Image (cartoon, grey):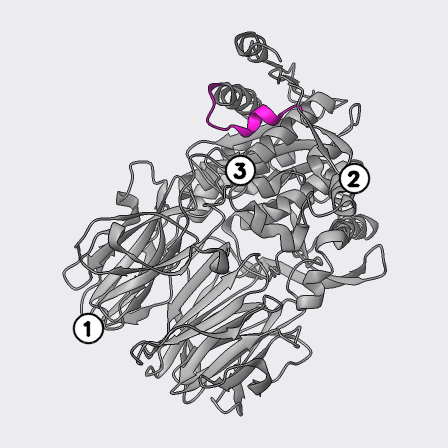
């Protein structure tokens, strides 16, 4: 074991970056990262972990390493000649008014709005015919904009509300309770809340969930148990009643609760992984009634959608991989009593409720089709959508006569529509005034063949008139996990990429939810390699069809998508010019030992499951598959120093391994955002800065010395 003082002196001694001209590669001298021998043995397999010390993200040594790495990274980025131009264009394009769909609580209509470059959206409200007033302004929560609004819930009559805040991007929340009518805080803040909503029972109080907070990022028996509490209004948090969890018989990693709209039932979900849940219900109108089990196994994803007296409406993929809506009765809610209201069909179903109707959203090759149904399951109509893309919303209280939904795709900024429930007519409620012309761009959906013959869809977006000559800068973005579906949506940052003649390509990889449970499961555990094969095949398709070439291809993804990028670049470093793994799960042998990691085992399995699972994970784990002397693509790893979902140690260890192994002149840099978490609630100013860095780095390593589209520069100068 080396002495820490000597490590610190040698590890962070200096930095050297030089360039004779922009035509020559910038030369990087990295801080030396100490390798301290740590060896684990699992099922007889010896595993070396020389960068284990970087897992302690609060130690002085790790903090010094972060400082040194950021000095190298920002010193490098500062030399990219058009980085500031990208930032200015992002700021200009971002600077337009953005408005959210309105919702009614009591006598007020509420809506979110951002004037343009505000770090956080502001919540406004107004009475009918009145003037809008600020109700909550998260920009005042902290001086630097890093404290964000992370949730909001009103009591049924709208007289009270509770909102959650996140500080520095953390998953840990605080709950602040207000008299909504008077717009004032009325009691002490609740602390140490995590993975929780807030659900009111009248004005008596509300349900929420949390863990016992650990000292660091490690797991323990306490932090592995989620607990459901009821907070009675006007009492201290110490007196909150434990409703479910906290015992060996009720040990679950995730517990959620909600009171139904009619305030009659408490619904509780309990799970140990990100897929599959138990389901319980309590009749709050019957004194002494306890929780009644609807499902006591975790073999399906099943949730209560709505109630009607004694009837329950459930969404489930039990015996229906593409989901179905069923009806049952609280007196006997067992699965053998379920009756189909909207049966399973060919395409994946999701359901919202509004005005006494069900709205069935079918995902057809990642594109939305929406139908309005009566509560007996009879079809009213197909909702006429304004185009091909993603429709979302379609939620409202039971007594409302209209609702709102939004529509978007990769080149169309989101438009909010008002929908009349009786007639089915839609009209524009709000449309953005943005300095971007969607008519100049187009999206096409292609189907390519993966390694094992599976057909995979991909949507490719670009400026009209594109020449398929293999020289177009291309961003290939993917996720491929946790039943997450990537559907078309507009992004200001991607708009700037498209303006520069860039291609934005999104394949719907296995592991996602685009084709139901079977598609998800095909990218989990010992089938995880399918996801990487699908992504590699997408890159090969784009190159073969001359959309781009290896020299102009970047791969990008975050979180589970960061794993995707890490695995792809270590398996096929020859395939791309640039790799951009963000907040990635990169140490697959230890991911389950940090914070919420153990709950991801449905998708990944763990190294402790079996010798076979250990070998499989070790076979693709990015940290464990970096090979010395390999020419890896130019790599910019991004993470947040306070990420307590995918802890930054993943990115730290991967960066250290790549820097030690890299051959050739391509840089391996890590950009560590301070006072930042996994991404949610990131201030607009930080998002703009990070995007300018990522796009600047990417284009620079595709050989550009200036922005491809100089008209943007002329516009900025004017």
Circle 1 crowding by C-alpha within 10 Å: few under 14, some 14–19, many from 20: few
Question: For the view shown, which residue lies furthest in the left direction?
Answer: 182
Q: Which residues are drawn in magenta? A: 50-60
Between the C-alphas of marks 3 and 1, the distance is: 48 Å
The x, y position of residue 367, in whole percent, is 62, 69
Residue under label 2, please give it: 571
Circle 2 crowding by C-alpha within 10 Å: few under 14, some 14–19, many from 20: some
Q: Secondary structure at mark 1?
A: loop
Query: Residue at the spot x=50%, y=50% of the render?
Result: 492
Residue 34 found in image quarter: top right
Which is more N-terminal, label 3 or label 2? 2
Report if residue 586 lies within the magenta region. no
> Looking at the rendered structure, which numbered label has been put on residue 647?
3
> Looking at the rendered structure, which numbered label has been put on residue 129?
1
Between the C-alphas of marks 2 and 3, the distance is: 23 Å
Report if residue 51 lies within the magenta region. yes
């Amino acid at each position: 074991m080396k002495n820490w003082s000597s490590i610190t002196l040698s590890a962070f001694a200096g930095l050297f970056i030089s360039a004779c001209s922009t035509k020559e590669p910038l030369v990087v001298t990295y801080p030396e990262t100490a390798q301290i021998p740590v060896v684990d043995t699992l099922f007889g397999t010896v595993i070396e972990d020389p960068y284990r010390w970087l897992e302690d993200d609060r130690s002085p040594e790790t903090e010094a390493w972060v400082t040194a790495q950021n000095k190298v990274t920002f010193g490098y980025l500062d030399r990219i000649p058009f980085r500031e131009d990208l930032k200015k264009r992002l700021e200009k394009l971002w600077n337009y008014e953005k408005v959210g769909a309105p919702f009614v609580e009591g006598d007020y209509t509420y809506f979110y709005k951002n004037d343009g470059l505000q770090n956080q959206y502001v919540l406004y409200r107004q009475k009918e015919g009145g003037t809008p007033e600020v109700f909550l302004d998260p920009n005042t929560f902290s001086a630097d904009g890093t404290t964000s609004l992370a949730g909001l819930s009103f009591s049924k009559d709208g007289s009270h509300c509770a909102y959650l805040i996140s500080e520095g991007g953390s998953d840990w929340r605080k709950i602040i309770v207000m008299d909504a009518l008077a717009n004032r805080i009325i009691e002490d803040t609740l602390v140490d809340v995590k993975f929780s909503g807030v659900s009111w029972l009248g004005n008596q109080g509300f349900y929420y969930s949390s863990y016992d907070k650990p000292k660091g990022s490690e797991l323990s028996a306490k932090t592995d148990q989620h607990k459901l509490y009821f907070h009675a209004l006007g009492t201290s948090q110490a007196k909150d009643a434990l409703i479910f969890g906290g015992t060996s018989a009720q040990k679950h990693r995730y517990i959620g609760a909600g009171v139904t709209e009619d305030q009659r039932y408490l619904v509780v979900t309990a799970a140990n992984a990100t897929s599959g849940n138990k389901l319980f219900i309590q009749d709050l109108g019957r004194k002494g009634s306890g929780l009644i089990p609807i499902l006591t196994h975790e073999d399906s994803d099943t949730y209560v959608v709505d109630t009607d007296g004694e009837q329950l409406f459930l969404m489930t993929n039990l015996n229906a991989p593409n989901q179905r809506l069923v009806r049952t009765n609280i007196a006997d809610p067992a699965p053998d009593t379920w009756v189909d209201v909207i049966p399973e069909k060919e395409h994946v179903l999701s359901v919202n409720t509004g005005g006494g109707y069900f709205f069935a959203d079918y995902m057809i090759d990642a594109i939305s089709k929406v139908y309005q149904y009566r509560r007996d399951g009879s079809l009213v109509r197909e909702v006429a959508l304004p185009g091909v893309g993603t429709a979302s919303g379609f939620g409202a209280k039971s007594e409302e006569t209209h609702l709102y939904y939004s529509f978007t795709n990769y080149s169309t900024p989101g438009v909010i529509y008002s929908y009349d429930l009786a007639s089915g007519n839609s009209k524009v409620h709000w449309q953005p005034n943005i300095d971007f012309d969607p008519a100049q761009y187009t999206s096409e959906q292609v189907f390519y063949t993966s390694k094992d013959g599976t057909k995979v869809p991909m949507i490719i977006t670009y400026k009209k008139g594109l020449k398929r000559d293999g020289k177009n800068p291309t961003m290939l973005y993917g996720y491929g996990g946790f039943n997450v579906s990537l559907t078309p949506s507009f992004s200001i940052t991607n708009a700037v990429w498209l303006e520069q003649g860039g291609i934005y390509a999104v394949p719907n990889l296995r592991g996602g939810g685009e084709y139901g449970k079977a598609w998800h499961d095909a990218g989990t555990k010992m089938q995880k390699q399918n996801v990487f094969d699908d992504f590699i095949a997408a890159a090969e398709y784009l190159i073969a069809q001359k959309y781009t070439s290896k020299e102009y291809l970047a791969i990008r993804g975050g979180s589970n998508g960061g794993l995707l990028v890490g695995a792809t670049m270590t398996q096929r470093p020859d395939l791309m010019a640039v790799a951009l793994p963000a907040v990635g799960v990169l140490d697959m042998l230890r991911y389950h030992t940090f914070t919420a990691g153990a709950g991801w085992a449905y998708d990944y399995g763990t190294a402790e499951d079996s010798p076979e699972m250990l070998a499989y994970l070790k076979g693709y784990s990015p940290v464990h598959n970096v090979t010395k002397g390999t020419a890896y693509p130019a790599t910019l790893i991004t993470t947040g120093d306070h990420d307590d979902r995918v802890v930054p140690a993943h990115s730290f260890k991967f960066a250290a391994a790549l820097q030690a192994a890299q051959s050739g002149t391509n840089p391996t840099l890590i950009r560590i955002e301070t006072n930042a978490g996994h991404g949610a609630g990131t201030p607009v100013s930080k998002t703009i800065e990070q995007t300018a860095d990522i796009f600047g780095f990417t284009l620079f390593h595709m050989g550009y010395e200036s922005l491809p589209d100089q008209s943007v520069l002329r516009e900025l100068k004017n």
